Image (tube, coloured by chain):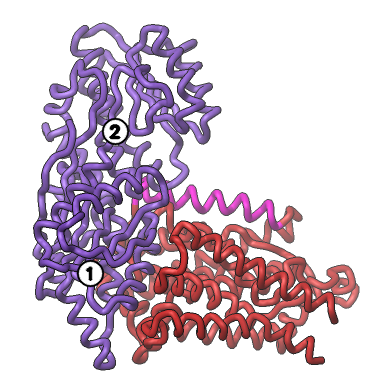
Chain colours: A purple, B red
Amino acid sequence: MKRRNMLKLPLAAAALSLVASVAVAQDAEKKVIGVSIPSATHGFMGGLNWHAQDTITRLGTVYPNLEFVLATAPDAAKQVSDIEDMLATRNIDGLVVLPFESEPLTDPVKQVKAAGKFVTVVDRGLSEEGIEDLYVAGDNTAFGRVAGEYFRDNLKDGGKIVVLRGIPTTLDNERVEAFQKALEGSGKEILDMQHGNWNRDDAFKVMQDYLAKYPEIDAVWAADDDMAVGVLESHRAGRPSGPDDRRRRRGHERHDQAHHGQGSATARERDLSAGADLVRDRDDRAALRVERADGGALHHRQPADYARKRGTVLLPRQPVLIGDTSRQRPEAAAASGFWFRGDVGGG
Amino acid sequence: MKRVDLHLLGPLIALVGLFILGALLNPAFLAPANLSNVLARSAFIGLIAIGMTFVITQGGLDLSVGSMAAFLAGITIMAMNWLAPITGANWGTILLGMSVALAGGIASGYVNGALVTKARIEAFIVTLGTMGIFRSLVTWLADGGTLSLDSSLRAIYRPVYFGGIGWVTWPIIVFAIAAILGEWAMRHTRFGRHVEAIGSNDRVARYSAVDVERTRLLTYVLLGALVGLATILYVPRLGSASGSTGVLWELEAIAAVIIGGTALKGGRGRVWGTVVGVLILSLIDNILNLADLVSPYLNGAIQGVIIVLAVVLQREKRAAD
């Protein structure tokens, strides 16, 4: 799911920022960092857990004086207990927390802060402002805006766009509103917006229905790796038969298949010719790890950028275009692997 | 007599009504491409729901099928990826992968069935447990991410979902054959009659020398095999499996079975009704996408209303006769 991708950067960055402020400043002195995240009940949290553990392993190698306490919780109540335990029995010096829910976690995290610990909140904010030392999250407005701007600038006048939305959440609304705002007055038309739920199967169905419903579609905003895979597959399923369908298919061939994601570090490394579905596979994650360990963006640059930074960090994101498919079959376009790199929001 | 007919035909009338509604709302609805899409999509839930009809008719329930499908898709993909360097990218490897899915389905169904019949644990609890187990296993196997089929194998395997005889793709053909065989098995075989007898009154069935436990076990194994078959058709579509594959399929399958006129408490099974139920559910989805009738936020509500209505209508009819 989408949010996993969005989070792997924040989480790593958050942990690293703690390192920068806790460990680098006082070399060799032993420090304990508590990490409290929701447990791996589904794919997105699975990815989150993977990256959390991976980051802990790498940081443990680089900074031997660091000790991590990782706790995963299936619900807010357990997370509260975890944090209380960390404070009471593990004597943590810093806390990285992705709140299961904002409300129930606000007070426990406040207690941690009151005990003089460095607190980093990731992704889901607390319900009270000013508790955390550092807030790291994805920039959802930029996510939608950058994609919208791309369509605005690259689509012919009167271009028709279909949108696949995520799971109905405020996060999805922020993205879509920013997308619509960027397109305002540009003469581009949004034909339809249905929920693909950041899910391959759902996106596959929705896209098939779009293709049946609209004879002409110029661009698709899939907004997510998984949904983009579903969209591409449903395109390939198009088979010609009657004259009506032939017209429709020509319509397909003119589509721009835009796919908007973030995480530039991975984007550069992805091999589109191998198929978009490799985007978040295990192998891909391994590649990501190697890149970072070798001194990629996250490992060295970001701690410096974010070190000792207090307040809010909205992580940059760059849109990715799966193929400019003008007069090409979608698969041919995908194979050509053209990336669109847009602007960077926040930071 | 007339009333009974209406009762039987209720779901069918609803299906025809949806067809007319769809055609009125959007002419693209009746295009062969769209119908082919809808039928092919229905095939996964359809195959599972056919098996579920037998399980529910004998008085059982299986909540694990969605997770089982995800798990089977996961091990199938892993098996094929592992075999590819040994056996090469060819149909042989695909067939081996398919047999992994089928054997895995039969084994998983046997585990469910054995826990219900031999360990004598409530079917609801057993399958609630295995639902969690299968879901966790696939998430664990995929390491929280996605398992993808080797691209060379995908190229060979793809036609299994997308290919077929003209517009009638393989999933539709398999679904149709399974439906016909299922209906025949329910109506005309000893196994089918035993299933209904056990669901009506398992004690009487036992006194009538029906091997109740064996028949019950067999329904779970049959369901497992059909989940395996559904997986075989599912994997070539996206070539991937993750922790979010097949989420809530079990509830869709159960809903389809009930809409089709099978009694949730068992004793009365109707495979053709299940097929109609599956089609109703996929058509609602399709029509809601094709026509901007309501806010997409309300799609789930519309489906819920139709499921409840279908069952309410049948209840009234039953009370009347």
Do residues under tags 1 and 2 come within 8 Å of each other at their CB atoms? no
Q: Judge by depth and name the residue closer to the eye, A99 or B175.
A: A99
Q: Does B181 appear above or below A109? A: below
> What residue is shown at x 62% (from left), y 52% (from top)?
B128
The chain that hosts pointer 2 is A
Mark 2 crowd level (few <14, some 14–19, many ≥20, 10 Å Cα): many
- Viewer-nearest of labels 1 and 2? 2
Residue B85 seen in render: no
Q: Judge by depth and name the residue closer to the eye, B73 or A114.
A: A114
> What residue is shown at x 12% (from left), y 67% (from top)?
A157
> What residue is shown at x 59% (from left), y 76% (from top)?
B277
Secondary structure of the residue carrying tag 2 is strand
Q: Does B206 appear above or below A10? A: below
What span is in magenta? B123-145
In percent of width and height, residue B14 lies at 61, 80
In percent of width and height, residue B222 lies at 61, 72
| Residue annotated with mark 2 | A137
